[in-house]
Amino acid sequence: MAEIKTKPTPVDVGAFIDAVENPIRRDDAKRVCAMLERITGEPPKMWGPSIIGFGSYHYRYDSGHEGDMCRLGFSPRKAELVLYILTGEPDEAEKLARLGKHKTGKSCLYIKKLADVDMAVLEEIASDALSYMDSKYPRP
C-alpha cells in the first residue's frame, strides 16, 4: 500500500501563513486559523506541505486502507481558501445557502475571500463539522 503523504509535519504554521503571497488570502488564513483553533480547542499543525489541520482522527475503510487525518483543516491556496469542513449531512445545504459566495467539492468548501461570506454561518458550519467528526470518530 502506498505511503500516505498527508501527515503531520514540523513546519511552523505561522511561518507558512506569513509566506502566503496574496495579502488578502494571508489575512483570511490568519482569521480562519484563529476561528478553527477556537472551535476545536486544538493548536494548528501542518499536515503535508499545505494543509493546516486541527486535531486528528484515525480512519479505516472497508478496503483495509487506513490512516490518520486532521479533524478539521484548511489550505490557503493561490486561487482560494480551501476548507476541509463539509460533512454532506442533510442540514448542511441550508447553511451553505446562507453562507454567501462559495463553491463546494466532496468535503471541501472553496472561498475566494472571507469578505464574500457570512462569518457566523462559516463558524456554524465548522462547529457542526466538528460535532459530526466527534460523533463518527470519538476522541480518545
Image (cartoon, helix red, strand yellow):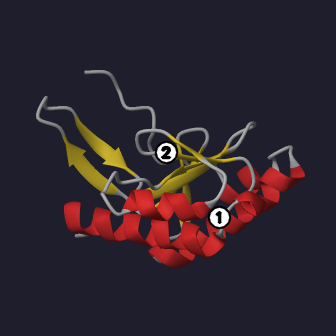
Label 1 sits on a secondary structure element that is helix
Residue 136 in the figure: left or right of residue 23: left
Nearest the camera: 69 or 106? 106
Whether residue 130 is visible here, answered yes or no, is yes
- Residue located at (44% from left, 72% from top): 127
Residue 117 in the figure: left or right of residue 109: right
Nearest the camera: 90 or 36? 90
Residue 138 in the figure: left or right of residue 70: left
- Residue located at (72% from left, 47% from top): 112
- Residue located at (71% from left, 67% from top): 31
Q: Pointer 2 and pointer 1: residues touching (CB < 8 Å)?
A: no
Label 2 sits on a secondary structure element that is loop
Q: Which residue is mark 2?
A: 108
Residue 127 in the figure: left or right of residue 113: left
Q: CA distance from mark 2 to mark 1?
A: 14 Å
Q: Which residue is mark 1?
A: 32
Nearest the camera: 28 or 12? 28
Residue 5 in picture, x, y percent from top left:
44, 32
> For mark 1, does the 10 Å Cα neighbourhood hold few (<14), some (14 to 19), or many (20 or more) residues?
many
> For mark 2, does the 10 Å Cα neighbourhood hold few (<14), some (14 to 19), or many (20 or more) residues?
some
Q: Amino acid at mark 2?
A: Cys
- Residue located at (60% from left, 72% from top): 35
Q: Amino acid at mark 1?
A: Val
